[in-house]
Image (cartoon, rainbow, N blue to C red):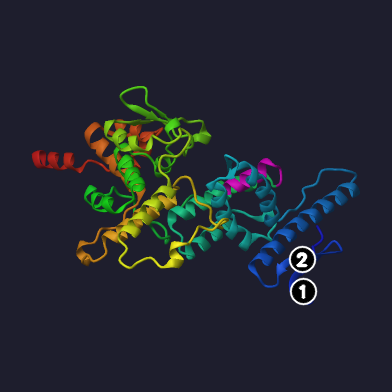
């Protein structure tokens, strides 16, 4: 049996008010005592220290047994520490951490909290089910719970590939099926529905020219929100009557897939005023949208500007640097702001319901399916399989109603 490690305690250095821990005969300062940052720093150092102790113990036992191979025990926390060193270099896109790294962090956080001190070879299907139930109890939706559990399975699969735990651990976890609709207490979320064009048209006059153009182009092409925000002139082939836009980054680029978006005459007219900028510049700039809003504020100003406001200059080194293009979140917030302005002064029964950019993609998919069928919708949305398009394109109820009227 491996000897039990005595974990150094989290303490306070009274002279400086800092948190401190003594590791291998050396004092390590962690920051302000009691702060969340100091506790996170403490947990990282302890994870590294545990890993060092386990490796030393394994080397000692190997030497005692004459170098024979023995299965070393390693805690879940230590497994997570090793995996995180790999994940920080693997989940990277264009030199920056991808969104998947953040999703992995959220998935592994409850695992580390509940089972960090447990031996990795003792984590089995019942442990995974208990972890899943804790996620359900924290009011996470069924889809989010299933996604995080799948990421945890992927984490243990990596551990098996690195020969840190036996393959039987991962095989056991694979037997845990995902939560099924209607057969779990997990919260369900409403499916994404198409947005009525009436509500879109009501908000467009209150948006900046940049955001308004993005909404109109996305509604006509069915692009993903991230694809319309990344549009550049150099990514658009304008050699024929129908332009073809190939985003330099998209959802399935890591799979080696290409994404080609046809741009027809209506979308071309919307985009054309933004093509005068350099080819490698983004078409829709949040800085230009902010300048447009400031100009409108000055035009609508009732009181005169004070002298201090007149001589005010931007900060030379602001903490938040302006971005050269919208992202999905800022695009969504701009639309929400427009809806809020449109609802100002409206009666409750006449207010515009909240909608977001992804619903424009659903609207386009539903329209194409109604006019040209599911295959056309699949090609237009850039899906590899038609069953994925089913999620985006609402079924044509009119045809079923006509059949019922004639035959039913």
Of residues 185 and 48, the one drawn nearer to the viewer in this rendering: 48
Label 2, label 1: how many angstroms apart (C-alpha)?
Answer: 10 Å
Residue 399 located left or right of residue 10: left
Is residue 181 visible to the viewer in this orientation of the structure?
no
The x and y percentages for residue 84 are 65, 49
Q: How far across and down, in percent of the image, does residue 177 sit?
A: 49, 49
Q: Is 161 included in the stretch rendered in magenta? A: yes
Q: Residues within 10 Å of mark 1 (few under 14, many from 20)?
A: few
Query: In the rendered image, which residue does mark 2 sit on?
Result: 29
What residue is at 77 percent from the left and 48 percent from the top?
Answer: 71
Q: Quadrant of the C terminus?
A: top left
Q: In the rendered structure, which segment of residues is drawn in magenta?
A: 153-164
Question: Which label's residue is closer to the chain start, 2 or 1?
Answer: 1
Looking at the image, is 278 positioned above or below residue 143?
above
- Which residue is labeled 1 in the image? 16
- Name the chief secondary structure element in magenta: helix
Q: Quadrant of residue 268?
A: top left
Q: Are marks 2 and 1 in contact (CB under 8 Å)?
A: yes
Q: Residues within 10 Å of mark 2 (few under 14, many from 20)?
A: some
Q: Secondary structure at mark 1?
A: loop
For mark 2, give the secondary structure: strand
């Amino acid at each position: 049996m491996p000897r039990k490690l005595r974990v150094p305690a989290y303490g306070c250095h009274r002279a400086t008010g800092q948190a401190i821990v003594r590791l291998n005969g050396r004092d390590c300062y962690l920051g302000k005592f009691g702060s969340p940052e100091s506790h996170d720093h403490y947990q990282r150092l302890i994870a590294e220290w545990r890993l060092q102790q386990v490796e030393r113990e394994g080397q000692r036992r190997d030497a005692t047994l004459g170098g024979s191979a023995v299965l070393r025990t390693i805690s879940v926390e230590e497994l997570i520490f090793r995996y995180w060193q790999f994940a920080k270099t693997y989940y990277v896109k264009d030199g920056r951490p991808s969104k998947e790294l953040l999703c992995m962090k959220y998935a592994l956080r409850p695992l580390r909290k509940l089972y960090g001190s447990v031996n990795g070879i003792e984590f089995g299907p019942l442990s995974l089910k208990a972890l899943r139930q804790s996620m359900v109890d924290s009011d996470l939706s069924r889809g989010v719970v299933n996604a995080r559990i799948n990421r945890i399975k992927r984490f243990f699969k990596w551990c098996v590939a690195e020969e840190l735990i036996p393959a039987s651990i991962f095989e056991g976890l694979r037997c845990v099926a995902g939560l099924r609709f209607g057969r779990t207490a997990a919260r369900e979320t409403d499916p994404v529905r198409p947005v009525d064009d009436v509500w879109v048209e009501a908000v467009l006059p209150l948006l900046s020219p940049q955001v308004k153009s993005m909404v109109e182009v996305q509604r006509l092409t069915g692009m993903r929100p991230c694809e319309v925000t990344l549009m550049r002139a150099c990514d658009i082939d304008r050699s024929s009557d129908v332009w073809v836009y190939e985003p330099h980054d998209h959802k399935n680029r890591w799979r080696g897939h290409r994404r080609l978006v046809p741009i027809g005459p209506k979308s071309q007219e919307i985009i054309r005023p933004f093509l005068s900028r350099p080819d490698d510049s983004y078409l829709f700039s949040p800085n230009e949208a902010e300048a447009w809003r400031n100009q409108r504020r000055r035009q609508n100003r009732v009181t005169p500007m004070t002298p201090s406001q007149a001589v005010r200059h931007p900060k030379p080194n602001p903490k938040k640097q302006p971005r050269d293009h919208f992202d999905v979140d800022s695009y969504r917030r701009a639309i929400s702001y427009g809806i809020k302005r449109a609802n100002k002064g409206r009666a409750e029964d006449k207010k515009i319901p909240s909608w977001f950019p992804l619903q424009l993609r659903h609207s386009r998919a539903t329209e194409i399916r109604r006019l040209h069928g599911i295959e056309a919708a699949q090609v237009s949305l850039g899906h590899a399989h038609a069953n994925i398009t089913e999620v985006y394109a609402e079924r044509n109820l009119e045809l079923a109603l006509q059949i019922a009227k004639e035959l039913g």
